Image (cartoon, rainbow, N blue to C red):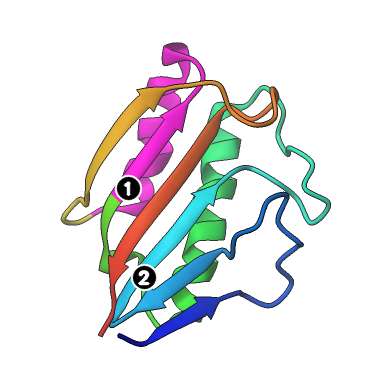
Amino acid sequence: MSKKAIIPAGTSTPIAPFVPGSMADNILYVSGTLPFDENNDVVHVGDAAAQTRHVLETIKSVVEEAGGTMDDITFNSIFITDWDNYKAVNEVYASYFPGEKPARYCIKVELVKPDALIEIASVAHIG
């Protein structure tokens, strides 16, 4: 098995020991992605839709760095802190996957930083 770390240009140093993505035999695993800026501070505090958009743009940058597109994503794990944000999350999410949707699950959790409302991890098959 070949394995390669995928780190888009401009990526900040993670707050834990991981890389944004790991590619193994044309399967890309995107780490849990939070709505962080370059200093690992939460962006768009209180706005679930904007945080979801930020997270998906970050995931998109990892997928594109690996040579893929959002259409290559086959599975998403979604973690939200409040079911009241579920509708806003889904509206933004649907705009990133307008065609055939990836499989997914969504669960309510506490996240590493209290102002973060969402985290998404993805799997993509590229090539």
- In this rendering, the answer to whether 127 lies above or below 90 is below
Quadrant of the image occupied by residue 93: top left
Indicate the secondary structure of the residue bearing disc 1: strand
Provide the residue designation for mark 1. Answer: 76
Which image quarter holds the C terminus? bottom left
Q: How crowded is mark 1: few (under 14 residues within 10 Å), some or many (20 or more)?
A: some
Residue 91 is situated, as x and y percent measured from the top left of the image, at 37, 34
Which image quarter holds the N terminus? bottom left
* Image point (39%, 37%), residue name: 78
Q: Which residue lies furthest to the left in this view?
A: 100
Indicate the secondary structure of the residue bearing disc 2: strand
* Image point (53%, 76%), residue name: 6
In the image, 40: left or right of 60? Answer: right
- In this rendering, the answer to whether 76 lies above or below 3 is above
* 77 in the magenta segment: yes
* 82 in the magenta segment: yes
Numbered-mark total? 2
Q: What residue type is labelled 2?
A: Leu
- In this rendering, the answer to whether 79 lies above or below 36 is above
Provide the residue designation for mark 2. Answer: 28
Residue 113 is situated, as x and y percent measured from the top left of the image, at 70, 29
Q: Which amino acid does label 1 sit on?
A: Asn
Quadrant of the image occupied by residue 100: bottom left
Q: Magenta segment, which residues? A: 76-98
* Image point (59%, 43%), residue name: 34
In the image, 71: left or right of 29? Answer: left
In-front residue for pair 3/59: 3
